[in-house]
């Protein structure tokens, strides 16, 4: 069902469970994501698969669904012959698909519209490096139109996520000013720094006094780095913290395959909560089974339908 209260109100009352990786669930459903648009391609020719992936996480107990718009940009869709009006419609559709899956689940589910970093549009791995050679003002100009289009579609929150660079974090916050939708800001990190090497405390600082920011935190990172990231986010801003790390496997870009063993452990949630986490979930390679285990620890087993 559509939530009857703002997400910020729910965070004030307790911990809310996020979904897991959308791309891995789509792959599990048989979707081919070997495309520069990644999961966003399915907004054009596979929206039923997107809705089914969202529904899998609702059944697992997720209370926040992150849309398929992470890699959806005007520039990326233009290369496929989609004009700006068409891209606006696809961005709005990403919100609608998540909303529909949430409402079908019969529980209170919020929709977070994903705003991925500039590097996601480049599709060359630079979202894990940052330092694109662009100014804060240039990054703000890039992000603002997409943020405005997503905000107009009526999500409950904008997920400014997988941000590798403090400059881009500042640009995203500026671009979201006045959009009328609350936001969370989430960095991808290595140790106690952004992927670009800036101290996390410095990167979080601009969010501290921003009333539109309902949570800050980390995502798309090693599970072992997440706990300290939660602590720094809480200490720096005093806001609720969002945390959704990867499975712990590593992507081999040359071989185009995942290496190593999964390290995501739902039992870490108690430590995250103690440090200030109020939005908890998983990112790449964390599927419905791990989210179900996480949800069971946070609020008990998901209801059966």
Image (cartoon, helix red, strand yellow):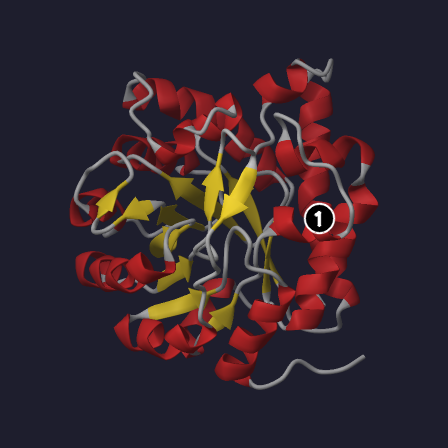
Residue 13 drawn above or below residue 55: below
Residue drawn at x 49%, y 80% as measured from the top left: 298
Image point 33% across, 20% down: which residue? 132
Residue 250 versus residue 59: which sits nearer the camera?
250
Whether residue 4 is visible to the viewer of this picture, yes or no, is: no
Q: Along the line of sight, which residue is nearer the eye, 72 or 95? A: 72
Q: Quadrant of the N terminus?
A: bottom right
- Provide the secondary structure element on which disc 1 rests: helix
State the image quarter where residue 202 is shown: top left
**Residue indicated by mark 1:** 26
Q: Position of residue 54 (x, y in %)?
A: 70, 56
Residue sitting at the far bottom: 300
Q: Relative to residue 137, is residue 220 drawn left or right? A: right
Q: Say if 129 sits above or below 192 in the image.
A: above
Q: Is residue 209 above or below residue 146?
A: below
Q: Residue at x 38, y 49 (%)?
A: 186
- The residue closer to the viewer here, 163 or 95, is 163
Q: Position of residue 226 (x, y in %)?
A: 32, 60
Assess disc 1: are there few (<14), some (14-19) or many (≥20) residues with their C-alpha within 10 Å of its C-alpha. many
**Percent from the top left, x then y, of residue 200?**
21, 48
Q: Is residue 142 above or below residue 291?
A: above
Q: Number of marks in the image?
A: 1
Instruction: Inspect this view and state whether residue 10 appears.
Output: yes
Which part of the image, by quadrant, shows the C terminus?
Answer: bottom right
Pinpoint residue 152: horizontal percent, then vertical percent: 61, 38
């Amino acid at each position: 069902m559509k939530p009857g209260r703002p997400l910020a109100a729910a965070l004030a009352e307790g911990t809310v469970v996020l979904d897991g990786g959308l791309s891995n669930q789509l792959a599990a459903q048989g979707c081919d994501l070997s495309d520069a648009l990644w999961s966003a391609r399915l907004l054009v020719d596979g929206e039923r698969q997107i809705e089914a992936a969202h529904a899998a996480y609702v059944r697992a107990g997720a209370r926040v669904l992150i849309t398929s718009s992470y890699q959806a940009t005007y520039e990326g869709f233009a290369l496929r012959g989609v004009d700006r009006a068409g891209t606006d419609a696809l961005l709005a559709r990403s919100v609608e698909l998540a909303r529909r899956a949430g409402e079908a689940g019969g529980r209170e589910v919020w929709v977070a519209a994903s705003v991925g970093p500039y590097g996601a549009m480049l599709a060359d791995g630079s979202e894990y490096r940052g330092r694109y050679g662009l100014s804060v003002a240039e990054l703000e100009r890039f992000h603002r139109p997409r943020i405005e289009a997503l905000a107009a579609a009526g999500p409950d929150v904008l997920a400014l996520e997988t941000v590798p660079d403090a400059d881009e974090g500042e640009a995203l916050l500026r671009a979201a000013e006045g959009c009328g939708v609350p936001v969370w800001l989430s960095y991808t990190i290595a140790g106690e720094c952004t992927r670009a090497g800036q101290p996390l405390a410095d990167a979080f600082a601009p969010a501290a006094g921003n009333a539109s920011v309902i949570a800050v935190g980390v995502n798309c990172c090693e599970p072992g780095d997440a706990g300290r990231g939660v602590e720094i986010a809480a200490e720096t801003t005093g806001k609720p913290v969002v945390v959704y790390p990867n499975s712990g496997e590593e992507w081999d870009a040359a071989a185009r395959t995942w290496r190593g063993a999964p390290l995501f452990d739902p039992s870490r949630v108690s430590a995250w909560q103690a440090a200030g986490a109020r939005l908890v979930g998983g990112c790449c390679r964390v599927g419905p089974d791990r989210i179900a285990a996480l949800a069971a620890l946070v609020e008990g087993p998901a209801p059966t339908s």
